[in-house]
Image: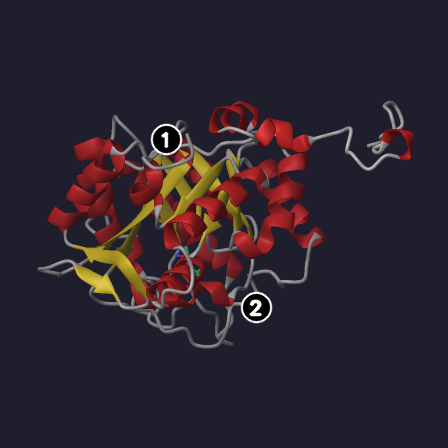
């Protein structure tokens, strides 16, 4: 970047600027015409939660405006999001009973499979239905996989279970599966299992660069999970950069069709770096803690909620995430920058 090819900024030593970037910002039409990036409804992914055994939708205390759904209210929320133009739905299930092996995740009648079937029947042709592959909503210890004799998450045993979960989800209607467990080799194992079961067309969205983040706090509330210990042996250290590139490189090599960075706002440098380096679509997840912080400050009257939401979505998109997973998807889809 250089100004060497034009007159000096103040020609003849004068004080009147020669270059005036404000010219292109003068009117709404000029600003729209010169906007470099613009996130639209089709780029947004709405996460939705189905809670087993619920008779009324239940608002999640630390995520005001986000609900654990009943089967009925889930179908309605899915239709509403699709009507607003949201590009995809990401479904999570909360089982009534948890156990050490997370069996609910594997059960063809398990809560997430019910959600996938209901939502696919309702809006499957009009949107993209994504299933989250993980065991943490289903295990009583809150970890993402099964534990070995020492209480560590057993990588290879866990990815065998993910492979089975992937097939069960594909059979229930998932068009995309999103392994979020950060186990080594999970994408390859899931690809093999899907292909072997005749689900070659089901795509994999890897939660590839997933940090061990406290921004997931309110999600625990959403899925009624209490974690024993922490996730630092499988999720990434917040200070690391190269590790993200390595994880993404491995996921793409293993067959990920899309990759994700998570959380979003505090990791925009990682989003940019990955977007510059890979040829697959890059998504970012604006997580529960990001949502809660904005809602809490807005409730106090300290920030302009709607403007902050739109600005943060624009920023995540600008950083290089084509798709943004956000709890505000349906609400903001039809009010994005036009
Ligand atoms: C795993 C999963 C989590 C989130 C999405 N998928 C929890 C975790 O890995 O700790 C977090 C999303 C959020 O915080 O909004 N099932």
Residue 123 horizontal/vertical position (percent): 21, 32
Residue 8 horizontal/vertical position (percent): 87, 30
118 vs 200, left or right, is left
- Using the image as rendered, state which of residue 167 and residue 181 is in the foreground: 181
Q: Which mark is residue 232?
A: 2
Rendered position, 34 above or below 244: above
Crowding at mark 2 (Cα within 10 Å: few <14, some 14-19, many 20+): few
From where the camera sits, is residue 124 visible?
Answer: yes
Residue 3 horizontal/vertical position (percent): 85, 30
- Using the image as rendered, state which of residue 186 and residue 228 is in the foreground: 228
Rendered position, 149 above or below 235: below
- Using the image as rendered, state which of residue 11 and residue 6 is in the foreground: 11
Q: Quadrant of ligand 1?
A: bottom left
Query: Which residue, given by chain and number where applicable, does mark 1 sit on?
Result: 199
Q: Which mark is residue 233?
A: none
- Using the image as rendered, state which of residue 329 and residue 219 is in the foreground: 329
The mark total stands at 2
Query: Which residue is pictured at 57% across the width and 53% down the height?
Result: 184
Is label 1 in a helix, a strand or a loop?
loop
């Amino acid at each position: 970047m250089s100004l060497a090819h034009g007159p000096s900024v103040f020609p003849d030593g004068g004080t009147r600027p020669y270059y005036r970037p404000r010219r292109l910002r003068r009117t709404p039409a000029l600003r729209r015409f010169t906007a470099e990036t613009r996130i639209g409804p089709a780029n947004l992914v709405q996460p939705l939660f189905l809670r087993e055994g619920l008779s009324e939708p239940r608002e999640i205390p630390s995520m005001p405006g986000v609900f654990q759904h009943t089967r009925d209210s889930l179908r309605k929320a899915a239709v509403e999001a699709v009507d607003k133009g949201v590009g995809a739905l990401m479904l999570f299930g909360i089982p009534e009973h948890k156990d050490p092996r997370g069996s609910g995740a594997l059960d063809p009648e398990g809560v997430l499979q019910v959600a996938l079937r209901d939502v696919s029947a309702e809006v499957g042709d009009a949107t993209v239905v994504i299933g989250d592959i993980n065991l943490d909503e289903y295990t009583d210890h809150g970890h993402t996989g099964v534990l070995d004799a020492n209480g560590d998450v057993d990588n290879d045993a866990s990815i065998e279970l993910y492979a089975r979960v992937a097939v069960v989800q594909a059979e229930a209607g998932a068009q995309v599966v999103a392994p979020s467990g950060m186990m080594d080799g999970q994408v390859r194992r899931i690809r093999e299992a899907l292909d072997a079961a005749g689900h070659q067309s089901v795509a994999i969205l890897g939660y590839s660069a997933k940090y061990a983040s406290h921004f997931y706090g309110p999600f625990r509330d959403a899925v009624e999970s209490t974690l024993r210990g922490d996730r630092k042996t499988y999720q990434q250290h917040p200070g690391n950069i190269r590790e993200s590139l390595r994880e993404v490189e491995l996921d793409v090599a293993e067959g990920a069709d899309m990759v994700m960075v998570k959380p979003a706002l505090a990791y925009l440098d990682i989003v940019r770096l990955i977007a510059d380096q890979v040829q697959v679509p890059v998504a970012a997840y604006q997580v529960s803690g990001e949502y809660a912080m904005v809602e809490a400050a807005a409730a106090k009257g300290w920030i302009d909620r709607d403007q902050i939401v739109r600005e943060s979505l624009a920023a995540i998109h600008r950083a290089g995430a084509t798709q943004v997973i956000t709890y505000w998807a349906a609400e903001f889809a039809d009010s994005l920058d036009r």
